Image (cartoon, rainbow, N blue to C red):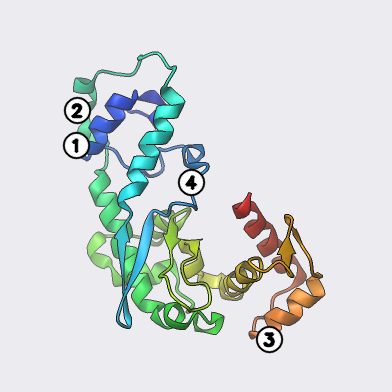
C-alpha cells in the first residue's frame, strides 16, 4: 500500500504521520495545498548573526499545512486506510525530519556561499551557484544533481531582515542557486524591489516601459534580452497573485 498524496488521509491520520515522522512535505503533497500561504509563510528562514548566516526550518510551516488540510477535509467522509496499516508500511515513507534537515543543511550552505549578497543586497554579489556544487559540497547526504534540483524547486526562503536591498523578502530557493541563469535571477531581484514602488508598479501593472526597465537593469550591470525580461516580469506578477 502506497499513499500518493495527502488527500488519501484524514486529518487525524496526517497528524499522526507528522508526529511519528513518517510523512514528508515533499513531492507527494499537491502544491495547491500551499495556496494562500506558500510565499507568505516561508518554509526556510535565513538568520543573520554578526556577519554570518544560518538557516532554520519554519516551525509554523507544518501547522499551516495541517490547517489547510483541515479546511479541505472538514466535510470529508473518513475512508482513508487504518493507522495501523500506515504505521506498518512506514518504510514506504521518508522521514519528515530527514527531509527538513536536508533542506536546512542545503540552505545553510547556500547562505554562507551567498554571504556577500545577503550582507549588502547588491545583485552583482549574487554568485553563480549550481545544484551540482551543492551535491559535491554536501556529499555526506549522497545527493546527485537532480536530487538537489528537487529540493531547491518550489522551496520558499525568507531572506534576513535588515537594510540591504531586498532584506526580509521571501523568495524561492532557486533565486539563490541560479545555475546557468545568473543574469536572469539578478534581474528578478532588481525587478522585485522596483515592484515595491508605486512609480514603477501599481494597480497590478507596470507603470514604466520595458525600455526603461532595461536601462535600470543595465545600471546594475545586468544585461538580459527582451524575452528574459518579459519572463521575469510575468513570474513576479504571478507570485503577487
Q: CA distance from mark 2 to mark 4?
A: 30 Å
Q: Are marks 2 and 4 in contact (CB under 8 Å)?
A: no
**Structural crowding at the residue carrying mark 3, measured as other residues with C-alpha within 10 Å and reported as few (<14), some (14–19) or many (≥20):** few
Residue 2 in percent (x, y) is at 32, 28
Per the image, label 1 sits on a secondary structure element best described as helix
Q: Are marks 1 and 2 in contact (CB under 8 Å)?
A: yes
Residue 10 in percent (x, y) is at 34, 23
Q: CA distance from mark 4 to mark 1?
A: 25 Å
**Structural crowding at the residue carrying mark 2, measured as other residues with C-alpha within 10 Å and reported as few (<14), some (14–19) or many (≥20):** some
Residue at horizontal 46%, vertical 80%?
117
**How many circles with numbers are drawn on the protein?**
4
Q: Are marks 1 and 3 in contact (CB under 8 Å)?
A: no
Lateral position of residue 36 relative to residue 218, left or right: left
Mark 1 or 2: in front is 1
Label 1 sits on residue = 20
Mark 4 or 3: in front is 4
Which comes before the other along the chain, label 4 or label 1? 1
Asked if 210 appears above or below 122 in the picture, the reply is above
Label 4 sits on residue = 37
Which comes before the other along the chain, label 1 or label 3? 1
Q: Are marks 2 and 3 in contact (CB under 8 Å)?
A: no
Q: Quadrant of residue 138?
A: bottom left
Per the image, label 3 sits on a secondary structure element best described as helix
Residue 78 in percent (x, y) is at 35, 15
Nearest to the observer: residue 224 or residue 20 = 20
Label 2 sits on residue = 87
Amino acid at each position: 500500500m502506497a499513499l500518493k498524496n495527502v488527500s488519501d488521509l484524514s486529518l487525524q491520520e496526517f497528524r499522526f504521520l507528522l508526529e511519528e515522522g513518517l510523512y514528508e512535505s515533499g513531492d507527494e503533497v499537491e502544491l495547491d495545498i500551499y495556496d494562500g500561504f506558500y510565499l507568505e509563510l516561508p518554509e526556510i528562514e535565513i538568520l543573520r548573526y554578526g556577519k554570518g548566516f544560518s538557516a532554520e526550518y519554519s516551525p509554523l510551516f507544518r501547522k499551516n499545512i495541517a490547517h489547510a488540510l483541515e479546511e479541505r477535509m472538514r466535510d470529508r467522509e473518513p475512508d482513508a486506510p487504518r493507522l495501523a496499516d500506515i504505521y506498518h508500511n512506514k518504510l514506504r515513507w521518508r522521514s519528515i525530519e530527514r527531509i527538513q534537515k536536508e533542506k536546512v543543511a542545503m540552505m545553510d550552505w547556500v547562505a554562507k556561499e551567498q554571504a556577500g549578497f545577503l550582507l549588502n543586497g547588491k545583485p552583482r554579489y549574487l554568485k553563480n551557484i549550481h545544484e551540482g556544487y551543492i551535491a559535491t559540497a554536501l556529499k555526506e547526504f549522497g545527493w546527485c544533481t537532480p536530487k538537489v534540483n528537487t529540493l531547491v524547486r518550489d522551496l520558499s526562503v525568507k531572506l534576513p531582515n535588515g537594510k540591504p536591498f531586498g532584506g526580509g523578502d521571501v523568495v524561492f530557493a532557486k533565486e539563490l542557486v541560479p545555475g546557468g541563469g545568473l543574469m536572469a535571477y539578478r534581474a528578478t531581484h532588481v525587478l522585485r524591489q522596483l515592484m515595491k514602488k508605486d512609480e514603477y508598479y501599481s494597480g497590478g501593472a507596470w507603470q514604466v516601459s520595458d525600455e526603461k526597465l532595461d536601462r535600470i537593469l543595465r545600471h546594475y550591470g545586468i544585461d538580459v534580452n527582451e524575452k528574459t525580461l518579459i519572463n521575469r516580469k510575468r513570474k513576479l506578477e504571478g507570485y503577487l497573485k
